Image (spheres, grey):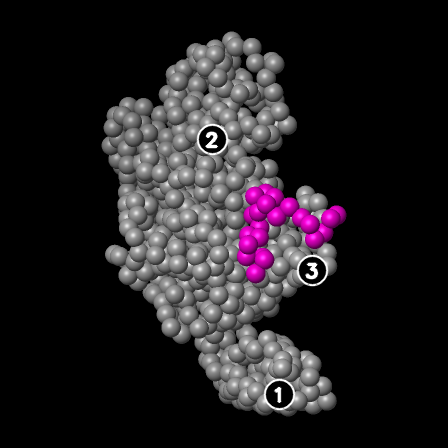
Amino acid sequence: MERSPTSAQSGVARPSCRRVPAYALRVDLAGSWRVAPADDDLRRDAIAADHDDSSWDQVTVPGHWRSHPAHAGADGPMLYRRSFAIDPPAAGRRRWITFDGIFYQADVWLDGAYLGDPEGYFVPHTFDVTALTRLGHEHVLAVEVSCPAATTGPRRAVTGVFQDSIGAAATWNPGGIWAPVTVVETGPVSVERFRVLCRDTDETRAHVLLYARLDSDESRHVRIRTLVDGRPVAEVERSLATGSNDLDWSLDIEAPRLWWPRALGEQPLTDITVEVLVEGAISHAASRRTGLREVAWNRWTCAINGERLFLKGANLLPTRLDLAAATPDEVRRDVESAAEAGLDLLRVHGHVARPEIYDAADELGVLLIQDFPLTGRQARSVRGQAVEQARNAVDLLGHHPSIAMWIAHDDPGGEDDRAATGQARRGLRRVLGHQVPTWNRSVLDRWVKRAIEKQDGTRPCVPHSGSLPHLPQLDGTDSHLSFGWRSGDIRDLERVAKRIPRLVRFVSEFGAQSVPDSPLDVDTSRWPEIDHDRLGSTFGAEMDVFAQRVPPADAESWDAWRNATQTYQAELVRYQIETLRRLKYRPTGGFTLHALNDPAPAISYSVLDHDRVPKKSFHALVRACVPVLVMMDRPPDLVVQGDHLRLAVHVVNDLRCELAPALVQVIARWGGGERSWAFGGDVPADECIKAGRIELDVPETLGALTFDLRFTAGDVVATNHYTTAVTILPD
C-alpha cells in the first residue's frame, strides 16, 4: 500500500487545493523495540500479546540487529516485539500496518494472529489489521526476521551487494527491520499500489501511463480523481469488486515543463496524485513525484527528449552496509559528489538504494541505471521471488525520471571469474564461461527482464550486465573490462577498441584498486610483513593483482605503498576515461567507472573511501570529465634518443554549442629545450574531433619530457599535461 506523503516525509507541501484528508491518522512505530534470538519455544509463546519481553534486548527500528552489541555476530533469525496503543477504528474505517523494508524475510503477527510472510528487503509490505484493531486499544506486533548468512555457493536471496562474497559484505548480515513501520487508517477503499510512467513527451504534450491497485472492503462504486500539481485534471467512475482491483489509465499533460539531465537543462518535477472517493469523501490517496521526459537508447547511446548525451558515470555502491544507520544527508551526499565531479550518470550497482538517492538524482539531474539486486550466481529456487520483486521494483521506482535503464542481473558468472587466480586464467575462464549456456543467463535473467518490461515499456531492460557475446545474444551487452588491473595493460583498452569496437559501446565496469587514506584496522608495524590474507578476506584487496601491479615489497612503508596504489589507480582512471571519451559515439555511448564509493572500510576500486575522503583517482576523474577536454595519445612511459613520436591531439566538446574559433597549443619541454605546435579550427557541439598530430624526434637529453596542452575558444579554456622520460637502452 502506498502512503500519501506528508511534508515531513518528502519535503513537499500538500497542494493548496487538497482538503484535509479523511485518512490522516498515522502512527509511526519507529523507536525502541524488543528483540531476542528466535527458537521454537519463543515462536510458540512470544507472539502472544501477554508475553513478558522485559528481559529482551532493546534495539532501534529502523535498524539492523547487528547494531546491538549482544547480536553483533548474529545471523538470526531474530524475534522483534513492539507494543502500541491506538483507538479502535470507527465504522467504515480500515487500518493497515506497512513495513517499508525488512531484511530479508519475515513472519508477522498482531496480537497473536498471523498476518503473513513478507520477503524482499526493498519491497513495502502491507497488512489489513482492521478487524484486529477493533478488538481493543492495546496491541503487540511480533515479527520474526530471517536473513540467512551469505554463502560461497549460488545465492538463495535477492540481497545483491549487501551479501557479496568478498570484503566486508562477505561477513556482514544486514538482517533487521531497516525501514519505517507505520499504522495508517483509510476509508473503505485503499490505494495499495500506484505506478506512474512517462511514456513519451515533447514541448506540446506529455503522455503519462498510470496504474493503481485498489483494495475495497466490498463491491461498490467509486470515483477516481487524478490531480497534477494539486489541480484535478480527470475524474471517472469505476465499479470495484471486493478485494484487489487493478486499474490502468493514461493522462495527457499539455505544455509540459520537460525534465532534463543536468548537462542539458533544468529539472522541474511534477506531483501526480490519485484520489479514491467513496460517497463524495476521499477514502485514500497516493502521490508520486515525477519528471516529464522521454528516454531512448540506440546502440548504447542514450537520448533524453531527443537529445543524445555521452554518459560519464560511476557505479554507486550502498552508502553503508548498515543501510538504516546512514543519515539522509549522508545518502544524498553521494549523488551530490557525483554531480560535483561532472558525472552525468550513476549506476545503482547490485542493489535498490534508499529513497533519498532517487530523490536527489531527480532533483540534481543525475541519470541512473538501476540494477535489480541479483549479483553473481543465483540458486534456481530464487526465480519466483526474483520475478515478483522485479515487478515491485518498477512500482516502487518507475516514476523517477532519473532512471534511464534497468539491468536484471549483474555479472551472472562474476564470482567464478573472481575465484580464478592469475591474469591469463581469469581471462580464459571468463571468455569460455560466457559461451556455455547457464540457467542464470538463459532462464533466470530472461524471466526477470520480461517481468520488468511487462511493467515498464518506457525504458529498456538489459538481461545481464558484463556478458560477452554469446548464443543467442551475439551482440553482447555492456562490458566489464579490467585492462591494466586483472588483465593486460592500461593501453590495451585502446587496442581492443580498434579490434572489437562493440566491447567499448558502453563500459560499465573498469578501474583498479587502491588503499584509502581513511584508517583501516591493519597492523603495519612490521612492514613489509603484513597479513595479506586478512587484507583480502576483510578488506577485499586482490593481493595477487597488487603483487603484479603495485607490489607491497617495492614500498618502504605502508604509507608509501598506499600512495603508490593511489597513483596507479589515478593513472588508469585518467587514461582509460580519455580513451573512451575520444571514442565518443564512435562507438562509445558512455561509461561507469567502478566505483564511486565504499560502503565499509575497504581496499577497493572506489574513488571516495568509506569516510568519503577523496583518493587521487577522484581528482583524476574530475579532471577527465570536464565538459571540454583537450587530450593527446598517451606517450610511452619511457623513450630513447632518436625515437620518433607521432601523437594525435583531440578535443571533445560535451557542450550544446559550437566552439569557434578555437585554438589548440602544444608545448613539448625537456632539459634545455622545447618545441611548440598550434592547430586552429572549429569544434562542433557534442562532438569529438581530431585537432591535429604532433611529431617529435626524442632529444638526446636524459630526464623528463613533458607535453602541455592548452585549448581556447572565447571564454572556454581547457588544459592537459603528459609526461614521459628520456632514457638509454641497456647494454
Marked residue nearer the N-terminal end (1 or 2): 2
Q: Is residue 725 left or right of residue 102?
A: right
SS class, disc 2? loop
Q: Which label was assigned to residue 132?
A: none
Q: Residue 108 magenta-drawn? A: no
Residue range of the region highlighted in magenta in the rendering: 525-548
- Between circles 1 and 2, the one closer to the viewer is 1
Compute the Cα span from label 1 to label 3.
Answer: 30 Å
Q: Is residue 319 above or below residue 434?
A: above
Q: Is residue 351 above or below residue 76?
A: below
Residue under numbered circle 3: 555
Compute the Cα span from label 1 to label 2.
Answer: 64 Å
Please report the residue visible at 46 percent of the width from the left and 31 percent of the height from the top.
148
The answer to whether the residue labelled 3 contacts the one labelled 2, judged by CB atoms less than 8 Å apart, is no
Q: Amino acid under label 1? A: Gln
Q: Quadrant location of the N terminus?
A: top left
Residue under numbered circle 1: 641
Q: Amino acid under label 3? A: Ala
Q: Amino acid under label 2? A: Cys
Compute the Cα span from label 3 to label 2.
Answer: 42 Å
The answer to whether the residue labelled 1 contacts the one labelled 3, judged by CB atoms less than 8 Å apart, is no
Q: Which label was assigned to residue 147?
A: 2
Front residue (pair 15, 77)? 77
